[in-house]
Image: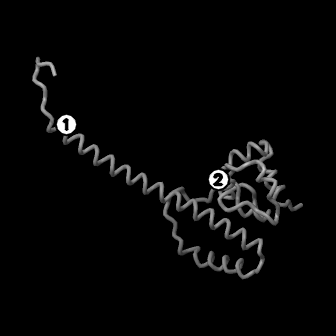
Amino acid sequence: MIMNFIERIESIIKPLSKAEFARKIGIHVSTIALWDDEHLPKGDILQRIHKEFNIDLNWLLTGEGEPYIQPAEGIKQGAPVDISRGLGRSVDMLANVLNSGNHLYIQMVLSVLSAFDSAVTHTKKQAEEIARLNKEYEELKKRVENLESTAPRPKKGVAA
């Protein structure tokens, strides 16, 4: 039996109430009632569901495949990936979906791409902020060392 979108959502939140699920992904509980096969969550919400519950987005959106993501063998978080291997195939798949004329599939692909773009942009901004703060820290550390090395030392036995 193929489940519809809301049935798939309900199947992954079984141990939780809808309110707890909504809180975990940062939405109002009433938002869940708006979802169905014609009205899907926005990409950023799909990304939060994916991240919080380790849910495969293809399964969530289409009901195909397995609900939970299995880690790919040999791929480690943060390891460089050779995108040239799958880029051509990915472009072909994207073109196929966009040329299908199926509004629902196109909406799903664009929502997922938007969510991933948002996640990557957010991660890049965090990395830039960390680099900026590290540089600032190193500069302040040098200034403190400079001040300490040039500050007059109190003489022994003399109160400062």
Q: CA distance from mark 2 to mark 1?
A: 47 Å
Q: Which residue is mark 1?
A: 148
Which of the 4 image quadrants contains residue 127?
bottom left
Q: Nearer the viewer, residue 101 or 56?
A: 101
Q: Amino acid at mark 2?
A: Lys
Mark 2 in CB contact with mark 1 (< 8 angstroms): no
> Colour scheme in the image?
one colour
Compared to 23, does 102 lie above or below?
below
Q: Residue at x 77, y 71 (%)?
A: 104
Q: Residue at x 65, y 59 (%)?
A: 44
Furthest residue toward right = 1
Residue 43 numbered mark, or none: none
Location of residue 80 in the rendering, given as x and y in whole percent from the top left corner: 49, 63
Query: Few, some or many C-alpha atoms within 10 Å of disc 1 (few <14, some 14-19, many ≥20)?
Result: few
Which of the 4 image quadrants contains residue 3?
bottom right
Furthest residue toward bottom = 99
Q: Give SS at disc 2.
A: helix
Q: Which residue is mark 2?
A: 51
Q: Amino acid at mark 1?
A: Glu
Location of residue 89 in the rendering, given as x and y in whole percent from the top left corner: 63, 77
Location of residue 141 in the rendering, given as x and y in whole percent from the top left corner: 27, 43
Q: Residue at x 80, y 57 (%)?
A: 34
Query: Few, some or many C-alpha atoms within 10 Å of disc 2 (few <14, some 14-19, many ≥20)?
Result: few
Q: Residue at x 33, y 49 (%)?
A: 136
Q: Give SS at disc 1.
A: helix
* Left or right: 9 as drawn, with respect to 124: right
Looking at marks 2 and 1 on the same chain, the residue that comes earlier in the sequence is marked by 2
Q: Is the N terminus in the top left, top right, bottom left or bottom right quadrant?
A: bottom right
